[in-house]
Amino acid sequence: MTTPKIWLITGAARGFGRRWTIAALERGDKVVATARDTSALGDLVDRFGDAILPLRLNVTDRQGVFAAVEQGRQVFGRLDVVLSNAGYGHQGAVEEIGEAEAKAQMDTNFFGTMWLAQAALPIFRAQSSGHLLAVSSVLGVSTVPSFGIYSASKFAVEGLLDTLSQEVAAFGVKVTLIEPGGYATDFNNSSSAKQSSPNQAYDGIRTGLAAAFATYEFGDPSATAAAILAVVDAEMPPLRIALGAGTIDQIEGSYRERLATWDAWRSVSVAAQG
C-alpha cells in the first residue's frame, strides 16, 4: 500500500482544480486547497474533515503564495505534490489587448506559477523529493487567433518549467506540464475568461473562430482525474502530458508544420552559421 500523498493545489474551488482535489481526497490523500474564495470548498471540508486544508489565496500575491505553501507544510509535515492550476483565459486579438489586461494575464498564469515553484522548491530540496505540476494548455504549444496573450502566458509556463526540470532533477524533484485541450468546464464564465474590447477589423477572425468551436468536441473534465493520478504516481512521470485525443492531434500538427518550415529553410539557416 502506497503512503498517502500531501498535495497543494491552487484554484481548487472549481473546474479542474476541484475535480483533482476530490480525486486525491477520495483515495485517502490530503490536500492544501487554495482558492480566492474558500467558501466554495465548504462542502469538501464537511465531507473530508481534516484531510483538506482550505486557504484563501490570490496567486498574484507572491508573499501570500510563500505563506500558503509554508502553512501547508507546517500543518501536514511535508508536501509531495504541488499543482499550479489557478488561471484564466483572456481573449482578444493582439492589437486589441490593453496594457493592464496583458499584465493581469501574465501575473496570474505565468508569475503565479513561478511564485508557487519558488515557494515549493526549498521544501522539495530539503525532502529530496517532490513533484511540481503546472497546468499549461494545448495553446501553450499551438496557437489560434484571439488567444495571443493567453498563449503567451502558457508558452512562458512551458519554457519556465522545461528549464526548471533540468535544474532540479539532481535534487529528486519531478516536474510535469499538463496540456489540456478544450473541456466542458467553467473556463468560459466571467471568472475564468475575460475579453478585450473588440476592434471591427477582426470581426471576421472572431466569426471564423466561433464557427470552428461550434463543432468542437469538448472533453469530459471528470475523465482527467485518472490521468493526473497516474502521472503523480508514476516512478518516472512525463515532463509533458496532453489531455484529450484532439489535443494530441493538434500538437502533432503544429510540430509537423514547424519541422517542415525549418527543413525548407535549412540551407539558409546553415549558411547563416558563417
Image (cartoon, rainbow, N blue to C red):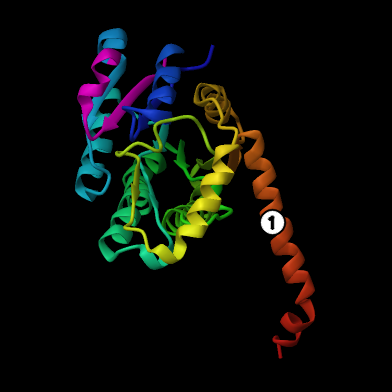
- In this view, the residue in front, 148 or 81, is 148
In the image, 109: left or right of 207? Answer: left
Quarter of the image holding residue 68?
top left
- In this view, the residue in front, 15 or 236, is 15
Q: Above or below — where is 226 with respect to 211?
A: above
In the image, 86: left or right of 60? Answer: right
- Rendering coords of residue 55 (x, y %): 22, 29
Q: Above or below — where is 18 with respect to 188?
A: above
- Rendering coords of residue 43 (x, y %): 27, 13
In the image, 30: left or right of 75? Answer: right
- Rendering coords of residue 45 (x, y %): 26, 14
Which amino acid is tagged 1?
Answer: Tyr
Please check the rendered image and state whether residue 36 is part of the magenta-colored stretch, yes or no.
yes
Residue that lies at the very extreme toward the top in this rendered image: 47
- Rendering coords of residue 15 (x, y %): 40, 29
Q: Which residue: 33% across, 56% down?
A: 196
Q: Which residue: 38% across, 40% down?
A: 126
Question: Badge 1 is on which residue?
Answer: 255
- In this view, the residue in front, 80 or 35, is 35
- In this view, the residue in front, 114 or 109, is 109
Q: Which residue: 51% across, 59% down?
A: 204
Which stretch did the figure color magenta? 28-44
Q: Quadrant of the N terminus?
A: top right
- Asked whether residue 55 appears in the rendered view, the answer is yes
- Asked whether residue 239 appears in the rendered view, the answer is no
Q: Above or below — where is 248 with respect to 186?
A: below
